[in-house]
Amino acid sequence: MSVARPWHEACSAARRVEVVLVHSVTTVPYVEALVALVGGRTIPRADGDRADLVVFACGRWSENDVASLRELEQAPDRAPVIVVSAACDPALRVRALASGADDFLDVPFAVEEFVARANALVRRSGRLRFGPLRIDTVRRAALVGDRRLLLTAREFELLVVLARRAGAVASREELMRAAGHEGRSNALDVHVNAIRQKLGKHAALVETVRGAGYRLRPPAK
């Protein structure tokens, strides 16, 4: 079954959506295949701070599952969690959601439903990513690699607009509105230069498109 651009537009076309797969059952290959089918890529749990979504696959439920969910809930840079289970037990769904899960799916389920729920979770999380750049619009935090960027409010808004464009050009007019500088074109350039300085060795991420505006450029491979 083909799924056209299934993940939310906030996830850049320059990278695959990264999914942490946590499991206590043997049906993991099925879930891994599903993640790959919808355009995602599983990554080790140790790299969970850069995940877009956590898929938690479990069986009948155990205290270890409860502890794992609560551990995920307490992570400082937590990705949304969707539980996948073949138990089909309403009590399990209630306990999973009370323990930190953001959504729950009973197996079997339609791929389209998984995609729709994943889209909604990623969208509501407010997390934007582009190459080494990570932005949390809810906590109003931005990181490049593992380094937090100390941005002004206007610089943060500009970076959010560029990240949401995911490599497409944002016009000068749009960026000036985001920064509250309508009619003051030179102020925009000052803010962009400041962002580049704070990005350090990743300054080339912000590219000038002459006569049009700015965009984020995928890092060289």
Image (tube, rainbow, N blue to C red):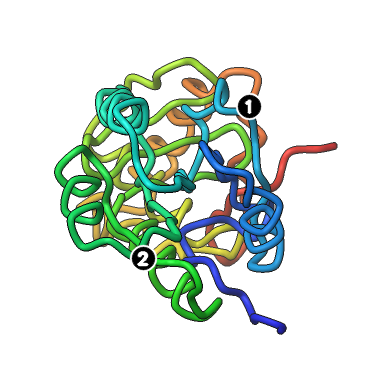
Q: Quadrant of residue 93?
A: bottom left
Residue at image coords 47%, 53%: 162
Residue situated in front as seen by the camera: 212 or 85: 85
How far across and down, in percent of the image, does residue 192 sit?
Answer: 45, 38
Q: Which is more N-terminal, label 2 or label 1?
A: 2
Residue at image coords 29%, 28%: 63
- Report the residue marked by disc 2: 174
Q: Secondary structure at mark 1?
A: helix
Type of amino acid at the residue the image marks with label 1: His
Type of amino acid at the residue the image marks with label 2: Glu
Give the side of residue 125 with respect to residue 129, left or right.
Answer: left
Q: Residues within 10 Å of mark 2 (few under 14, many from 20)?
A: some
* Residue 44 tag number: none
Residue situated in front as seen by the camera: 35 or 145: 35
Give the side of residue 186 with respect to residue 47, left or right.
Answer: left
- Report the residue marked by disc 1: 202
Q: Secondary structure at mark 2?
A: helix
* Quadrant of the drawing holding the C terminus: top right
